[in-house]
Amino acid sequence: MAVTSYEKRVLCDNCGRWVSRTRVDAATFERLVRQQDPDEEDLFEEEYEHPVAVVVTHVPVCGHCQEAT
């Protein structure tokens, strides 16, 4: 049985780029889910070599967007 990994990903709402991707432990993942109460698009599981549960947080603009203005 494959062990699930957990990730927090940050998405820029302005340009749609992934700002960061961080592995977290199961307890941190559960705390993030409780605090954010994400919708279906922001909480999902990917299945590659092993399952990865992902919670997405958003930022209004990223460093790339700020440099462009």
Image (cartoon, helix red, strand yellow):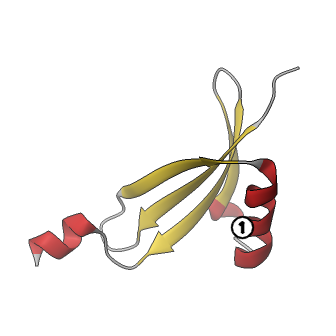
Identify the element where label 1 is drawn.
helix
Whole-percent x, y for residue 31 in the image: 78, 67
Image height of 18 relative to 23, above or below = below
Residue at the image point whose x is 32% and y is 74% from the top? 14
Q: Find disc 1 in the rendering and name its residue.
A: 32
Would residue 55 be found to the left or right of residue 30 on screen? left
Q: Nearer the viewer, residue 5 or 40?
A: 5
- Residue type for callout 1: Leu
Residue at the image point whose x is 32% and y is 76% from the top? 61
Would residue 48 be found to the left or right of residue 65 on screen? right
Whole-percent x, y for residue 48 in the image: 63, 25
Query: What is the count of numbered marks?
Result: 1
The answer to which image quadrant residue 17 occupies is bottom left
Image quadrant holding the N terminus, namely top right
The answer to which image quadrant residue 32 occupies is bottom right
Residue at the image point whose x is 55% and y is 68% from the top? 57
The answer to which image quadrant residue 46 occupies is top right
Query: How crowded is the residue under tag 1: few (<14 C-alpha within 10 Å), some, or many (20+)?
Result: some
Q: Nearer the viewer, residue 68 or 8?
A: 8
Whole-percent x, y for residue 34 in the image: 80, 72
